[in-house]
Image (cartoon, grey):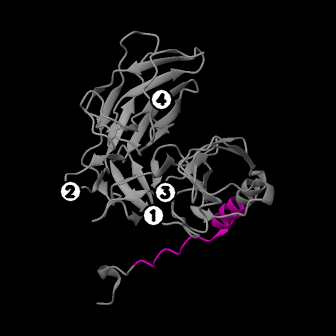
């Protein structure tokens, strides 16, 4: 039994674990199928900017009143806890359609500071901070992307999603971007291997943040019914083949997590099928794949350590040392 003030039914929201005890639910939307008190037109989306907290020990919901900068309503964003700061970074998403009918996607970064929030104190407040004036190679606006923390836990990494174009969400971006919140700087990272098209895919991160496992997605590619791994130590993509008894039907909008070396995948909607959501649960043993990546990373680190340092250029003779 769960007590407290639960959030309204939502889709395309985020759920982030905080302090190993609280599930932080941010944003999301719901599709209006009929008029609601004359405010919402049928067939339109209604977005949320709310933050809800589920105490996993007491099994109690609470709604957080966040202060600070305005956090615009959205769905299809990513929300990532950065261990170095303890704050949650939110990037992108969609806030609906513009007047010309093109979906309005976002490329903003908002930081949620929960340190001042005590769930046991009535009326506790979190604080939003808009990361404005970002520099570097800012990624295009998007929704349905994947995000996670960098290997050292200080930066937000983003890949994939539906990106804004002149027509409704028709551009895919395979680039991997990193955002440093202290410097407010974006950077596009160079990766090795073939980068997959990742749209509405499910991503999970190993506990030591060394490897990201991503499965499924709405983009029809050779990898969308399989598995993609990104080794964060070498920034190398790989696409191992699952064993026949572990293959997952091609799907998107699922959720995934890693428990040790086992990837747990739940739900989603299968491609080329009806739009009905699935309640299937899959458990994929990735221990052999992770062990191979660990060995490759160790070998690469050993090779880098034994490579000779580049020779320093010889100093040019000073004018006083030259012949007179």
What is the C-alpha distance between the residues marked 4 and 3? Answer: 23 Å
Q: Is residue 321 above or below residue 185?
A: below
What is the C-alpha distance between the residues marked 4 and 2? Answer: 34 Å
Question: Which of the two labelled residues, at mark 4 and mark 1, occupies the earlier sequence position?
Answer: 4
Residue that lies at the very extreme toward the left in this rendered image? 99
Q: Which region of the structure is painted magenta?
A: 296-315
Q: Residues within 10 Å of mark 1 (few under 14, many from 20)?
A: some
CB within 8 Å, label 4 to label 2: no
Instruction: Mark 4 vs mark 1: give the one in front.
Output: 4
Instruction: Mark 1 vs mark 3: give the one in front.
Output: 3
Question: Which of the two labelled residues, at mark 1 and mark 2, occupies the earlier sequence position?
Answer: 2
* Residue at 42% across, 27% down: 8
Image location (x, y in percent) of residue 105: 32, 52
CB within 8 Å, label 4 to label 1: no
Residue position marked by numbered label 4 in the rendering: 24
CB within 8 Å, label 1 to label 2: no
Image location (x, y in percent) of residue 16: 51, 34
Residue position marked by numbered label 1 in the rendering: 175
Instruction: Mark 4 vs mark 3: give the one in front.
Output: 3
Residue situated in front as seen by the camera: 293 or 27 = 27
* Residue at 33% across, 55% down: 141
């Amino acid at each position: 039994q769960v007590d407290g003030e639960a959030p309204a039914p939502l889709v395309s929201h985020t759920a982030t674990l905080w302090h190993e005890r609280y599930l932080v639910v941010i944003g999301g939307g719901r599709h209006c199928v009929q008029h609601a008190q004359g405010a919402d037109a049928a067939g339109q989306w209604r977005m949320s900017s709310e933050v809800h907290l589920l105490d996993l020990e007491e099994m109690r919901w609470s709604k957080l009143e966040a202060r600070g900068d305005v956090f615009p309503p959205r769905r299809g964003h990513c929300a990532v806890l950065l261990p170095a700061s303890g704050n949650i970074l939110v990037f992108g998403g969609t806030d609906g359609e513009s007047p010309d009918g093109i979906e309005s996607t976002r490329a903003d970064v908002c930081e949620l500071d929960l340190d001042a929030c005590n769930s046991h104190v009535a009326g506790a407040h979190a604080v939003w901070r808009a990361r404005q004036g970002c520099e570097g190679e800012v990624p295009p606006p998007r929704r349905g992307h994947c995000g996670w923390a960098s290997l050292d836990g200080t930066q937000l990494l983003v890949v994939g999603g539906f990106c804004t174009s002149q027509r409704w969400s028709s551009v895919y971006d395979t680039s991997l971007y990193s955002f440093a919140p202290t410097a407010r700087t974006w950077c596009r990272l160079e990766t090795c291997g073939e980068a997959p098209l990742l749209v509405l895919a499910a991503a999970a991160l190993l506990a030591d943040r060394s490897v990201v496992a991503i499965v499924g997605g709405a983009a029809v590619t050779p990898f969308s019914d399989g598995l993609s791994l990104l080794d964060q130590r070498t920034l190398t993509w790989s696409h191992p083949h699952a064993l026949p008894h572990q293959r997952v039907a091609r799907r998107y909008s699922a959720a995934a997590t890693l428990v040790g070396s086992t990837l747990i995948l739940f739900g989603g909607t299968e491609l080329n099928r009806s739009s009905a959501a699935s309640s299937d649960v899959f458990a994929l043993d990735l221990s052999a794949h992770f062990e191979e990546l660990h060995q490759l990373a160790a070998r690469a680190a050993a090779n880098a350590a034994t490579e000779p340092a580049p020779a320093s250029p010889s100093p040019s003779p000073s004018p006083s040392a030259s012949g007179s």
